[in-house]
Amino acid sequence: MPGPVKPLSRTTEADMDSDKEAPGTAGKPARRQRGRRRDTHTAVTENFEWAVIRMAEAFDRSTKGLLAAAGHGDISPQEERILNMIRLHDRPKPAAIVARLLNRDDLPNLQYSLRKLERSGLVEKTADERGKKVNYTVTEAGRALTEQFARIRRELIVDQLEPLEGIEDRLRRGARVLSLLTGLYDEAGRISATYAPNTR
């Protein structure tokens, strides 16, 4: 396993200077303590972000390997997620719903992936009952791929986790934390659009 990566600090000199008291002023110990707490919190947050980045890279590599083992190395990890999301609950879904479930806002790129999956014979378009909306559903080939992928994934990943003590509770807590942070980072992305460049 790789050792911990030293995080790139996002703390600025202005942040550090804000913790300094002018000579002869009171409250230095409390100010220094607050500064140390903030520095610790910043370091912990950055270490978490780096862990998420490394996890995402490992997740994509494992998905590529599983797809190749299932005989579909030509499918990308992003396309595999779209395919599995369409298969979810065995219910046809429009592109907009797939994007929402995957927390994606790049609908044109997702539609390109859908066309690629359609050309590969893994999904097909269907019309709703009123014929006004286009939905996507998995084909028999798509169903076979998702089942083969799930079988290999269980053998190589899920079954390896099962013997670990308390793993299910830890995964549940981890999922809740990640869901909370997903909302936080999404909100930060929206708010950052209101910031003028080079003004903070």
Image: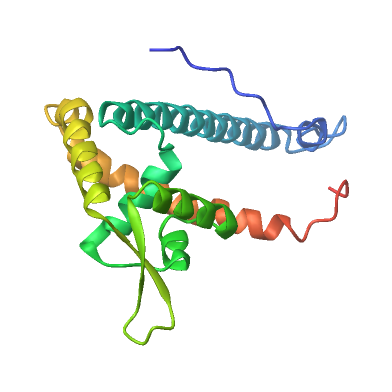
Q: Quadrant of the N terminus?
A: top left
* Of 18 and 189, the residue lying toward us: 189
Q: Residue furthest left?
A: 163
Residue 131 against residue 174 in the figure, above or below: below
Indicate left or right for 72 with 54 as reference: left
- How is colour applied across the structure in the image? rainbow
Question: How far from the left and from the top, in percent, is residue 43?
Answer: 57, 29
Residue 185 against residue 97 in the figure, above or below: above
Residue 27 picture quarter: top right
Indicate left or right for 38 with 104 as reference: right
* Of 35 and 140, the residue lying toward us: 140
Residue 166 picture quarter: top left
Question: How far from the left and from the top, in percent, is residue 41?
Answer: 56, 35
Question: How far from the left and from the top, in percent, is residue 121?
Answer: 34, 50
* Of 26 and 37, the residue lying toward us: 37
Residue 100 against residue 6 in the figure, above or below: below
Q: Residue furthest bottom?
A: 130
Count of marks overlaid on the render: 0
Q: Residue at x 13, y 31 (%)?
A: 162
Indicate left or right for 186 with 30 as reference: left
Residue 196 against residue 73 in the figure, above or below: below
Residue 90 picture quarter: bottom left
Question: How far from the left and from the top, in percent, is residue 82?
Answer: 39, 51
Indicate left or right for 102 with 6 as reference: left
Q: Residue at x 77, y 31 (%)?
A: 16
